[in-house]
Amino acid sequence: MVFEKAYAGIDLGGTKMLAVIADAQGKVLASEEQPTLADEGAESVMSRMAGMVRRLIALGGRQVSGLGVATAGTLDPEDGTVRYAGNLGWTQVPLGRTLERELGLKVTVENDANAAAYGEWKAGAGRGTRNCVFVTVSTGIGGGIVEGGRLIRGWTASAGEIGHLTIDWNGPACGCGNVGCLELYASGTAIGKAGAAAAAADPAAGRAMLDLAGGDAARITSREVAAAAEGGNPLALKLLRNAGRALGAGLASVVHLANPELIVLGGGASKIGAPLLGPMEEEFRRRVIPSLGEKVRIVPPELGVPAGAIGAALMAE
């Protein structure tokens, strides 16, 4: 029996890792998920990654033509070294070379947001476009840019840091060293912090969020803010409106820079819905240069959680 070409992909996260075998169209043929257990050390993690790929190859009864790995952190794309990944506690880990030696496969290592962007462009919501930006709004805000059918990596393979666009030059300090970064206003973390501060300052107005958090303002996250807003709480709705407007302003800047035909908006916070996305769309349309943005569509992703693993696999073609 002759099989079409297949590729392996792994999305390596701080808490879990997802491995897939996918065909050239991005269809997942087999998958396996495991906890990362990063505290056991890089050698242990890489050994278990190799084991996942071997099992999936055996399960599918077919060979794969390459392996792609999506991971957070700063990378050397030439040899697949993870220079630094805080979520894993890794510094100068030869991820690509180690997996090539273990598996006898060509290994491509890519930033996780870039891999998800590539997956959505080639096999998801961005199919058929040539210019597409993927934005993920979750704990932080990240992204990837596809231009002319090619992933834009930048000089040090770090392009797409959309969360660190400055939207307030007098804003609070960000962990990146800048101030007023977009993710300080519109990420899931930012929404949760704003909810906690607002409820602590005005417990009566924030009662709905406090009740959902067991009465402890410090336990309020974006989930409690979103749930309170769904119930009609005015304070929660105001917080999401502010975050949505910040996100819309950031996306307008992305369009001014990259001139895409499509923005794919993913991540957990993006699922909050109209209380966040309505103000985002209004602010985006208000700020974007009409000739650049009037035809730009902002759409949800299609691949969901496996986007990084699928994108990584497709990049191994």
Image (cartoon, rainbow, N blue to C red):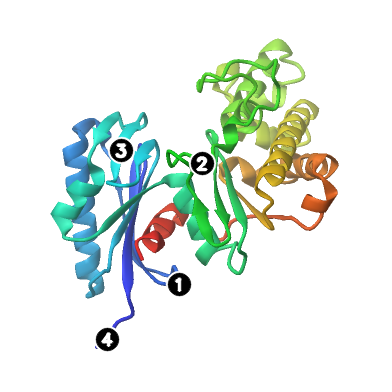
Looking at the picture, which amino acid does disc 1 mark? Gln
Q: Which residue is mark 4?
A: 2
Front disc: 1 or 3: 3
Front disc: 2 or 4: 2
Q: Which residue is mark 2?
A: 159
What distance separates the C-alpha of mark 2 from that of mark 4? 39 Å
Give the class, few, some or many, for how many residues have Cα within 10 Å of label 1's Cα (few <14, many ≥20): few
What distance separates the C-alpha of mark 2 from that of mark 3? 16 Å
Q: Are marks 2 and 3 in contact (CB under 8 Å)?
A: no
What distance separates the C-alpha of mark 1 from that of mark 3? 28 Å
* Label 2 or label 4, whichever comes before in sequence order: 4
Front disc: 2 or 3: 2
Depth check, front residue: 246 or 203: 246
Label annotation for residue 25: 1
Looking at the picture, which amino acid does disc 2 mark? Ala
Label annotation for residue 82: 3
* Label 4 or label 3, whichever comes before in sequence order: 4
